[in-house]
Amino acid sequence: MRRSIAAFLGLEIYAGVFALFQLLGGVRTDEAKYLLNIPYPHPPLMRWILSQVEGWQSQEFFVRFIIASVVVQAVWLVWRQSRWWRHEERLALAGCWLLSGGVLLQSGSIMMAPLIALQALVFVWVAAQRDEDWSPWSHFLGLLWLASLFTAYQAVLVIPLVIAIFWRMHISTTWKLLYILLPLFLLVLYTLSNPLAAASFVHVSADNSSLASREWVEGALRSWLVGGSVVLSVVGVWGMILTRSWSLFLSFLLVFGYAFISSRSYHAILFTPLLIGGLIELHQRRRVKVFPIFLFTGASAIVLSLNLSVSPPSPAREVSRVLAERGVEGELLIAGPFGHEWQYESLLPVRRYKPEFLPGAGAVVCIHPSTSSGQVPCKEIESEKGWMKVQEIPIVLWVRSR
Amino acid sequence: MLSLILPTYNEAENLSDLLEEIDHVLKTVPYEVIVVDDDSPDRTWEVAQLLAEERPYLRVLRRRGRRGLASAVVEGFAMAGGDVLVVMDADRQHDSSLLPQLYAAIQNGADIAVASRYTEGGGTGVWMRARTFESALATRCVRFVCGVSVRDPLSGFFALKREHFRRVASSLRPRGFKILLEVLSQLPRGMRVEEFPYHFRIRTAGESKLTMCVRMQFLIQICFLALRRAQNVLGTFQKSLFLLVCAIVFLSLAPPAWALRLLYTDPSVRDATQKMLVTLAEREGWLLSDVLLQEVSRDRIRFLHRRHARGHDLSHCYELISSAMSLLSCDEA
């Protein structure tokens, strides 16, 4: 027990490091969507929960730490899956989870992908227990499937695992279909009730269509390799194919396809639970040694970590600090493209800049001009009386003089 | 035949005397003894193997990489060849003279026979008050939470029919050290249980295994058993719970989806709505993500505008009439 408590605390410290690391980059536009419960792109369950603490001063760190903790502590589920293994093999498997690129890069980020990865890990675990009769837990698994779908659309990617789980249960076919399909139907209904969600997918697809094919392929491959710190990525897939774990492999193909079309680096963690599942199957059926895989995964993880960089934080926080110090009131007008992190950081209501809004504004931020229009943003304000430019920050900020 | 399982951990000093006691007590009963040792540092397994050379009825299982009294008992039961399975501690705190009575009870039709500290005539011996209180409290909690009627469900000294073990073996989750509790919670109600009083004896050699870790494992075991009992009690309500949640979700999503149906069924309405929203957002300086459509008809749309600011997150309901592009508050409309 003492060792377990020490391990738990050690993992919490590990999670804290991730949370602090992500904190350096500040709140990003995608993260702000979940912290503020902005109704796209994902369904409402998790973002509603996160937004309940939006009034807290330290909401950002609190949420980062919670997400990092659950991702890191999910290693106990991995540990449980290997309970009949030798001790050093168990430790190696746990190390593969903790040092996978997905966990390294995404723990502590306020995104839905790590949460979906956790739910996927539960499904991987349940699917692996082939001799267990999960029928008494059918309702719980059905609710978990519903909750997953209402956390993020990405949960659909593990539908092969979900089908395998329910199909094996000793329940009627009607109930199997209900458990699998009813949550999907409700997700479709949600999408119909929120056209913004569907529109956001169309918008992202339009954005991505400008990428070259080579970039699409590279993006998907990168996500896959990062997800398992390269070595686990290859071994995990090899394990799925060699042991004919088709539900795992089909889920992997779906995730790969998704990474292909979405081209976002934060999807790497979606691969991680599937790769762990593949490695477990490989060891259990083919007695492959896990420890060397862990060593190579660890080495890749070190290389990955050395190449980690934090994107500079948005100037939104700095601007908010300056405005708070000066006691600025009114609206914050922003000229140019901006992300939701401005809504998150700003104490003033945010609005797009238009000269006619100046009378009600207390501050104006002029973001880098669009090269297509060639116009200098906020040109009008230079000739307006009662405005002064703030010099101390690396962004163009005008505040109303007192 | 009686199969006696002795789970051991660092009981090398006690084993020889215990086996002599058992030999004496079970003179008239056909029996085998299986020592299941968790790779004791004091090499209890080696002592048992030496003793087995003189005792053909004695078998030894040395477990490496696995620990836990309950799991040791399960493995011992699985190895056993007798039709009556008995388990007792190897520290000589259990009164081995009860073995023939437990065996006879099973032979006479009882499903489980338990040596009980809490039935009339039984006792916890000379435990310290704190431990006596702790044991009694734990027993009461278990009886309440897990719904077992046996007075001493935490007894480590009991016998059961082999066929009952076979029935529940695959569903046993042997955590911690209270295997009787696990077995009782898995067997169907209506099993005939007989309890026999005994007094818990003082340990003569070795160390107690009752540590804080073991206490925590016990608490975890109780939680799991309570959960399982709740599952059984809820029964068909569980499926109803799933349907109930789905129904609530459906009832909350269906009306707004219905109110927006023209967006999906009529491309002209969809295009017009999109144009209206984009024009409005540009005019008002709003972000489109701050606009939540609630209802779409051919001549107007209704929506909520929410600023998505931290803490003070006001939302207003508006109606936009397409012909005039005039914005009205929902109250005015």
Image: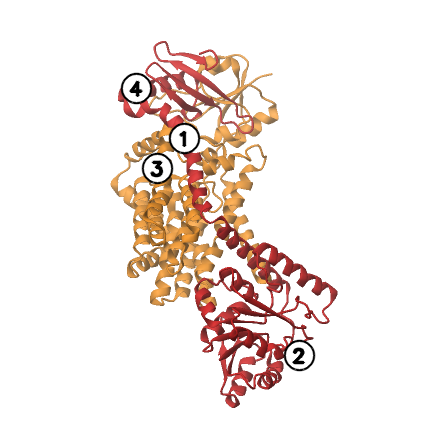
Chain colours: A orange, B red
Residue at the spot of label 4 = B269
For disc 4, the chain is: B
Residue at the spot of label 3 = A185
Q: Tell me what residue is drawn at x 54 percent, y 29 percent.
A: B310
**Are the residues under marks 3 and 1 on the same chain?**
no
Q: Is residue A14 above or below residue A46?
A: below
Is the residue marked by circle 2 packed among few (<14), some (14-19), or many (20+) residues within 10 Å? Answer: some
Can residue B258 be seen?
Answer: yes
Separation (CA) of disc 4 from disc 3? 25 Å
Is the residue marked by circle 4 packed among few (<14), some (14-19), or many (20+) residues within 10 Å? Answer: some
Q: Tag 2's secondary structure?
A: loop
**Are the residues under marks 1 and 2 on the same chain?**
yes
Residue at the spot of label 1 = B253
Question: What amino acid type is highlighted by mark number 1?
Answer: Leu
Q: Which mark is residue B205?
A: 2
Q: Pointers 4 and 3 in contact (CB under 8 A)?
A: no
Question: What amino acid type is highlighted by mark number 2?
Answer: Ala
Q: Nearer the viewer, residue A95 or B270?
A: B270
Q: Earlier in the sequence, mark 2 or mark 4?
A: 2
Q: Earlier in the sequence, mark 1 or mark 4?
A: 1
